[in-house]
Image: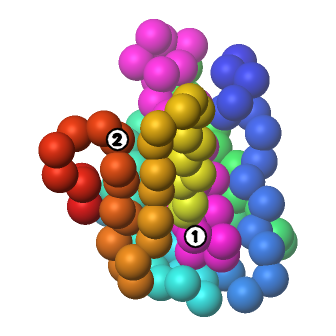
């Protein structure tokens, strides 16, 4: 069994997960709504506050899809609750970064700044 696929996805409060027709999983939360179509061979079970994924056989394709869809749904739950962030770190001398509203202004030693 896949170690990733075996772990259930915990559903935090404020998030609703529904399984629609044609195996489409919808995740709704405070930051939006995301949808993902699941392969018809992968079995999705929504119980209490968890979502579990099961595969029918040990074929290579089923093993690959098992962990993939568990990770995708887990990331969707994280996306509608916390959102995604990216942290950058400038290392060295002569670099400067400034935040101008919604733009990042980088002075990296070129003749003009990069926005």
Q: How many labels sit on residues?
A: 2
Residue 42 x, y percent position in the rendering? 49, 40
Where, quadrant-wise, is the C terminus in this rendering? bottom left
Viewer-side residue, 101 vs 23:
101
Vertical placement of 101 versus 41: above or below?
below
Q: Main secondary structure of the magenta part?
A: helix
| Left or right relative to 48: residue 72 | left
Separation of marks 2 and 1 at Cα, in angstroms: 29 Å
Residue 44 shows in the view: no
Name the residue nearer the viewer: 88 or 34: 88
Residue 67 sits inside the magenta stretch: yes
Give the residue at mark 2: 108
Which residue occupies the foreground of this view, 22 or 113? 113
| Residue at x-position 34% and y-position 62% | 105
The residue closer to the viewer here, 115 or 83, is 115
- Tell me if 47 is positioned left or right of 39 in this view: right
What is the magenta range?
A: 58-83
* Residue drawn where x is 48% and y is 84% of the image: 32
**Residue 111 can be seen in this image:** yes
Mark 2 vs 1, N-terminal side: 1
Image position, residue 54 (x, y; %): 63, 38
Structural crowding at the residue carrying mark 1, measured as other residues with C-alpha within 10 Å and reported as few (<14), some (14–19) or many (≥20): few
Task: Residue under label 1, please give it.
Answer: 83
Image coordinates for residue 31, horizontal then vertical, percent:
54, 84
Q: Is residue 69 above or below residue 25?
A: above
| Horizontal side, residue 3 vs residue 73: left or right | right
Residue 53 occupies quadrant: top right
Answer whether residue 40 is magenta in the image: no
Secondary element type, mark 1: loop
Q: Farthest residue to the left: give it.
A: 111
């Amino acid at each position: 069994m896949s170690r990733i696929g075996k772990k259930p996805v915990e559903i935090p409060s404020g998030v609703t997960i529904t399984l629609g027709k044609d195996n489409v999983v919808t995740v709704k939360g405070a930051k939006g709504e995301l949808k993902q179509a699941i392969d018809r061979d992968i079995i999705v079970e929504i119980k209490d506050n968890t979502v579990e994924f099961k595969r029918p056989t040990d074929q290579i394709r089923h093993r690959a899809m098992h962990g993939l869809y568990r990770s995708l749904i887990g990331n969707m739950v994280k996306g509608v609750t916390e959102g995604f962030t990216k942290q950058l770190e400038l290392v060295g001398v002569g670099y400067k970064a400034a935040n101008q509203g919604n733009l990042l202004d980088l002075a990296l030693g070129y003749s003009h700044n990069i926005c």
